[in-house]
Amino acid sequence: MSVAPNALTVQLLGPLRVWRGDEELAIGPPKQRALFALLATQPGNVVSREQIVDGLWGPEAPNTALNGVHTYVAGLRRVLDPGRRGRESGRLLLSTAGGYELCLPLESVDAAQFVRRCNQARRMAADRQVEAAFDNLGKALGLWRGEALAGVPGPFAALERGRLREMRFSAVEDWIAGMITAGRYEEAIVVTTEAISQEPLREKLRCLLMLALSHCGRQAHALQAYNDARAVLREELGIEPGAELRSLHQRILSGAVGQGQQERAPVPRAAVAAPRPEPAAAGSPPTGAVPYPSQLPSRSRVFVGREEELSSVRQMLTEEDPERGRATPIVAIDGPPGVGKSALALELAHESLDRFPDGHLYADLRGTSGHPPTPFEVLARLLQGLGVTAGSVPADLDGRVMLYRSLLHGKRMLVLLDDALDVNQTRILIPQGPACVIVTGRRPQRGLVARYGAHRISLKPLDSETASGLLIRLLDGAATRGSSEAIHRLVELCGYLPLGIRITAASLLMDPYASPERLAALYEDPVTRLDLLTVQGDEGMSVRAALGASYRSLPEKAARLFRLLAAMGLEGFDVPEPGGAQAVDSEVRGALELLADLGLLERTGSGGYQFSKLIRAYAEEMAELEEGLSRPGRRLAVRSTPGRAGGDRAAFFPRVKSVPEGHPSG
């Protein structure tokens, strides 16, 4: 179908440009351009006002957002329908119940043409029309003029930009595979090299380059291409090449691939993009293949210890379980602030990539932020990671849950849910089947254990030798020779917490005048220690901030108990069993359990608790700030001031035994 001479033509595959015949239209200010782009990605479909607000502003939309939408719609109508009179709706931009519709044929929008040609190529390839499929892919890729929606602001534009980019490079991989199959090796090398410069982490492109080089008789260059890929992956992501890349490397080494061999180029996992689902089917899975998400953050360059925990999960994932497929494997990792929960989860996830060939989803649940997202919001992001456009995400929670489970049905996919608040945030994010879910959070995920039989890992601080080894590895041994005693003292003062140890390593590496001995001396003062255990400009690298996130989540009585325990000088203590003459009431016992669940106290046995040195320093700081007790006089005040801490101790925490000196829990 051809476009009429004076019809509107929209270019999204590059900077946003709109034409009426040969005349380019000025669409207006950035937000107005973002609104037009949102409507143009769904021509002929109604986009609700709520979707527009979400796409232009996201969750932080101002109260005036709807007024802004009306203003931008009016501005677009002046551009698109200059002959429109008064309050007429216009021919191109229609108002409907609850939303707006841009009346354009698909042929008018280059992004829609791109998707259509890619899907035609897929059908042609399935019918063995190889040359026609290759030609269609070339025409589809010829529509691109740069980064999609370049310069268009807003959350929707960012998501659509990423979606279109993924579709583009999937088509590029198919196109290059077609070149190799047709024997156009030199051309394939040029195109693949250019594509790798834009997407250096796509292993499929590296495979295609190695194939093209080896078929040209350039085995040495093909092997060097593998070494280059391995170096980039290790440097950027801390991972080794995947199974496909390693297998191709071995076949080239053995001479099974090369000049004169008949091996064909592999077909990429998601060869071409799936078509956009129709709005009427928004509650059902999109047609075509689910995209391959790869959302995991990078893991740390240095990771030591946790061998027992890693081994237990490896065994769980590899053992032949007759129930596998009936119940989703779940790993629930909990522990105190800074103990390395996310680091362990990422280590587990990255070393298990080959076990989950359908992709890897990641969601930061921000359970310690004070404003964690709801499952409704998290599902929207996960669905978009699975290729569902923002406009096609169901508007109700049940619809999102059903679509999410449908898309993951039968998929060997890894889902990492980081920093969960509680089971209410994670429960409905558990899919059914061969997927695997890793959940991290400060509170024990008892609900996941009880409901689904999750494999629980309760992390403790590192032991002294492992903690010292971590600091030495982080420093590359450069500043540790002859400083063994200071190294051990530093990790002890860090509470053997990986977060504190990593910050300490950064301090030693960044300061040319620092030494383990000097830093250990500074750490002896608790206030100075907490001040120094912070990386300026990175809120996630601060021991005080990590502890504060748990402290601020406490109810007031539990927070006061936390302060008063430190003010009383109790490093460790036993709580009498219920029913005894000295038993504490259930409210106090519940507060102690909550403090332990959040990692602000350590359990040392039945009814036994203790502070770690680092957390006690923070608790003393809070007692000083909020109870008004100076450090030198705190214990005296606790024992002798009836109107403040002493009185509170008697009323709120009766008959708690202080652990005698030399007690194992002290």
Image: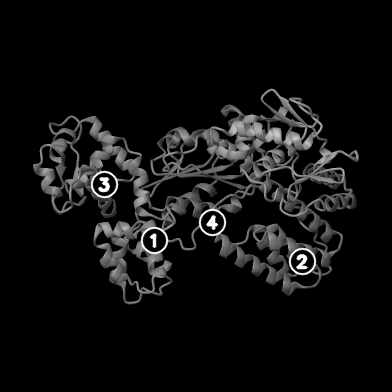
> Distance of mark 1 from mark 3, alpha carbons?
22 Å
According to the picture, the residue beneath numbered tag 3 turns out to be 622
The residue at the far left in this view is 640
Instruction: Verify CB contact (< 8 Å) between mark 2 and mark 3.
Output: no
Q: Is residue 47 above or below residue 132?
A: above
According to the picture, the residue beneath numbered tag 1 turns out to be 503
> Distance of mark 2 from mark 3, alpha carbons?
66 Å
| Comes first in the chain, label 2 or label 4 | 2
| Comes first in the chain, label 1 or label 2 | 2
Q: Is residue 393 visible?
A: no
According to the picture, the residue beneath numbered tag 2 turns out to be 257
Q: Position of residue 380 (x, y in %)?
A: 59, 37
Instruction: Verify CB contact (< 8 Å) between mark 1 and mark 2.
Output: no
Callout 3: SS = helix
Which residue is nearer to you in this view: 234 or 323? 234
According to the picture, the residue beneath numbered tag 4 turns out to be 298
Q: Is residue 39 above or below residue 95?
A: below
